Every structure is written in C-alpha cells, then in structure tokens.
Image: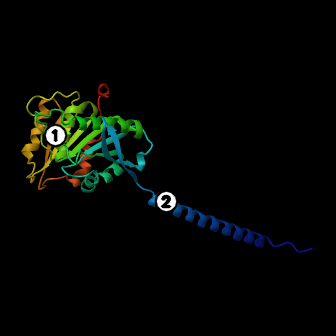
C-alpha cells in the first residue's frame, strides 16, 4: 500500500490543474473577444440601398441609408435630401457627408433623385403642375419609409442644397402636412411662390442657410424664401455662414441636425 501524499503535495497538484484550466479559459475568452471585435469592425455601420419605385407610371430612384443602430426599429426619424443641379444621389452623399451624420445620430436618410438629375427651378405659368410628379414621389416615399423601414410619420424632415434647396421650398409649400421641419441650403424661392401668400396646411419651421461669399445664389435671394414663409406664419430662421461660398457646408452638419432634431408634426397633421 502506497503511503499517503503529504497535504502540501495534494494542494500543489490541485493548484496546478486549476491554473491550467484558468489559463485555458482565459485564452478562449481572449479569442472569443477578438472574434467578436473583428465581426464588429467588419460588420457595416449602415446598410446603403439603391432602389427605385413606380410613382404614377414614372420610375423614380433613391438612395437609402439605414444605420445599424436603427435597423428593424420603429419610430425612427427620417431625413429626405434633395441634391443640386445635375447631381446624382451618390454625389450628394459624397459632398455633404450626411451618411456619417445619419449613422452618428440614428436616423433614416433618403436621397431622392431628381428627374434627369434636376428639380424644377421654377413653375412656369404654362406648366403649373411641373412639380406635381416630384411631390407625388416625396409623398410616396414618406409612406414607404413609415411602412417598410419604421419611420416616424411625425418626424419627417426635408433638406436641400442649391437647386435642391429651391425644390425644398416648393415641396414645403406643397406638402407641409408631411414635414416636421425643413432646411434650405443656398436655395432660391422659385416663381411663383413669392407672388401670393403661401397657403400651407402645417406651419413647419424652416432654417435658411447661405454662405456670405455665395455668388450663384446670394444671401438676398435665399432671404426671399425666408420672408415668404414668415409671411405665411411659419417659424423661420436665417443664417449666413461667414466666408463660405456656394454649396453644402458639411462642417455645419451637426448644427443642421440640432435644428431638425426634436421637431414633430402636430398630431392633427399626421
């Protein structure tokens, strides 16, 4: 019969086995954490979709950004973006940097593509319904974002730059019942909006921004839109960006969202 091992030898063996097990578990834990980190880094921060939709027999295109943080959720704010003349939705995404803002702040971002890369710069007397197809496109997309992507119908925002800013003026005049707030970037007031008082269903707030060095659409041109909506009873703000020329001031993106965020349609306007 073998002699019993001293107590200290038994304790030492148990400790060695415990250390070995702990070390193995630690290695496994590190590997799992590393794997999770790699998956997190490789997993896209947002899904970007290029889609089209039929609106009154016309095929319309758009670019949708769905941040990972809001995918599958309900009650998500929606921002519609209107590009400048002869631009594509991808070009607007590039020069505005709005994709990153959507990811950081957690809202659906929809770039609408204009017909033939443009929006109507004005409404001529001989074609008073020129903007109607674009208004129908906007309304249809509002419904789609709510039904298919969890958009909040009371937090739908509109922004545009240059010709898209002018179109934002038009859409706000035509579809104010859908819009919680509008931001007009260096956009003029298209004729004939300034010829008669605007009759808007919802007095949504608007912010007009323009560069002090903008020679294409000078501040006075942008202010005409501000004044027209102010006369119609809308809360309006006007801001000149010192030293900036024509285009989208991406350095102002955070302030753009500060203006839009939290604005809601009144319940009766849904």
Please report the residue visible at 41 percent of the width from the left and 45 percent of the height from the top. 70
Q: Name the spot of residue 57 as percent of width and height, x first.
A: 31, 37
Q: Quadrant of the C terminus?
A: top left
| In this rendering, position of residue 91 left or right of residue 208 | right
Q: Quadrant of residue 171?
A: top left
**Which quadrant of the rendered structure holds the N terminus?**
bottom right
Q: Earlier in the sequence, mark 1 or mark 2?
A: 2
Give left or right: position of 79 versus 32: left
Give the Cα separation between the discs numbered 1 and 2.
Answer: 44 Å
Say which of 126 and 222 sits in front.
Answer: 126
User: Residue 169 at what x, y percent from top left?
Assistant: 18, 38
Which residue is under mark 2? 39
Q: Residue furthest right?
A: 1
Residue 198 seen by the camera: yes
Q: Residue at x 33, y 39 (%)?
A: 54
Q: Secondary structure at mark 2?
A: helix
- The number of numbered badges drawn on the structure is 2
Q: Which mark is residue 237?
A: 1
Q: Is residue 107 visible?
A: no
Colouring: rainbow
Front residue of 160 and 204: 160
Rate crowding at label 2 as few (under 14), some (14 to 19) or many (20 or more) other CA atoms within 10 Å: few
Q: Residue furthest front?
A: 57
């Amino acid at each position: 019969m073998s002699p019993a091992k001293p107590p200290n030898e038994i304790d030492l063996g148990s400790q060695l086995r415990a250390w070995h097990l702990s070390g193995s578990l630690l290695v496994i834990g590190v590997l799992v954490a590393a794997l999770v980190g790699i998956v997190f880094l490789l997993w896209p921060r947002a899904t970007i979709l290029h889609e089209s939709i039929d609106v009154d027999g016309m095929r319309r295109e758009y670019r949708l950004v769905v941040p990972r943080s809001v995918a599958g959720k309900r009650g998500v704010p929606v921002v519609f973006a209107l590009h400048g003349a002869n631009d594509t939705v991808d070009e607007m995404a590039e020069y505005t940097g709005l994709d990153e803002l959507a990811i950081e702040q957690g809202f659906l971002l929809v770039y609408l593509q204009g017909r033939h890369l443009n929006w109507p710069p004005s409404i001529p007397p001989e074609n008073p319904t020129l903007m109607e197809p674009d208004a129908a496109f906007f309304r249809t997309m509002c419904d789609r974002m709510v039904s298919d992507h969890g958009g909040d119908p009371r937090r739908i925002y509109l922004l545009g730059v240059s010709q898209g800013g002018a179109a934002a003026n038009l859409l706000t005049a035509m579809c104010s019942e859908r819009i919680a707030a509008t931001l007009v970037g260096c956009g003029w007031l298209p004729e004939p909006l300034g010829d008669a008082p605007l009759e808007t269903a919802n007095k949504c707030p608007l912010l007009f921004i323009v560069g002090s060095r903008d020679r294409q659409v000078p501040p006075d041109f942008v202010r005409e839109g501000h004044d027209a909506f102010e006369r119609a009873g809308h809360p309006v703000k006007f801001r000149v960006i010192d030293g900036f020329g024509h285009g989208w001031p991406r350095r102002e993106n955070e302030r753009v969202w500060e203006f839009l965020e939290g604005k809601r349609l009144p319940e009766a306007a849904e």
